[in-house]
Amino acid sequence: MDEKIACPKCGSSDKLFLISTIQKIGTAVGGGVGSIAGYLGRGSGICTGAIIGARIGSIVPGVGTVAGIAVGGLAGALAGFFTGAAIGNYVGKYIDKNVICKYKCNNCGTTFSR
Ligand SMILES: [Zn+2]
């Protein structure tokens, strides 16, 4: 907790938790968008994994190239997922903390907005 916020019912300030609704949504949405972006971008810049994968795979011609592209594309999607999820999590946390500001008191169970 950065700021001192007290529960309106019992006055406790050390058992308060930020209810992170948007943070969870942000993580899921960000992860989804990121994985799509990563997958779509696998042929360009950010996802050179596909190209590298295809080159390594090309040592075994034909099947290897296809498998290499598939693996590279998957790696790109995964990288995109983690990047997107991290951004979504950060944005969601910011919204939760600065826009919604809903807290739950673990001392008495009260839920309140700041
Ligand atoms: Zn309380």
Image: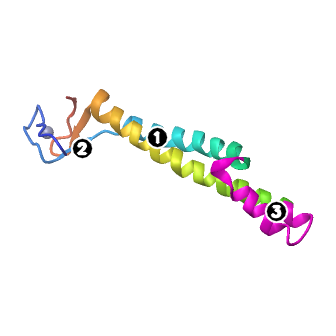
Q: Quadrant of ligand 1?
A: top left
Which residue lies under the disc numbered 2? 17
Asked where in the image residue 78 lies, by quadrant, the reply is bottom right
Q: Position of residue 22 (x, y in %)?
A: 40, 35
Determine crowd level at label 3: few under 14, some 14-19, many 20+ residues with C-alpha closer than 10 A: some
Q: Is label 1 in a helix, a strand or a loop?
A: helix
CB of mark 2 within 8 Å of CB of mark 3? no
Q: Residue at x 70, y 49 (%)?
A: 42
Q: Secondary structure under badge 2?
A: strand
Which of the two marks, 1 or 2, is nearer to us in this view? 1
- Principal secondary structure, stretch drawn in magenta: helix
> In x, y percent, where is residue 87?
46, 43
Nearer to the camera, 43 or 107: 43
| Labels 1 and 2: the sequence-earlier one | 2
- Would you say 84 lies left or right of 108 here? right
Measured Cα–Cα span from mark 1 to mark 3: 31 Å
Q: Is mark 3 within 8 Å of ligand 1?
A: no
Amino acid type shown at disc 2? Phe
Provide the residue span drawn in magenta. 44-65
Per the rendering, the mark at residue 67 is: 3
**Number of the label disc, if any, that sits on residue 71:** none
**Residue 27 painted magenta:** no
Residue at image location 79% in from the left, 57% down from the top:
69
Decide which of 23, 36 is in the foreground and name it.
Answer: 36
Q: Which mark is residue 88?
A: 1
The amino acid marked with disc number 3 is Ala
In percent of width and height, residue 9 lies at 10, 33
SS class, disc 3: helix
Question: What's the distance in space between the residues labelled 1 and 2, CA to CA?
Answer: 20 Å
Residue name at image x 9 percent, y 42 percent: 12
Q: Nearer the viewer, residue 102 or 56?
A: 56
Q: Name, please, the residue furthest toward the bottom.
A: 59
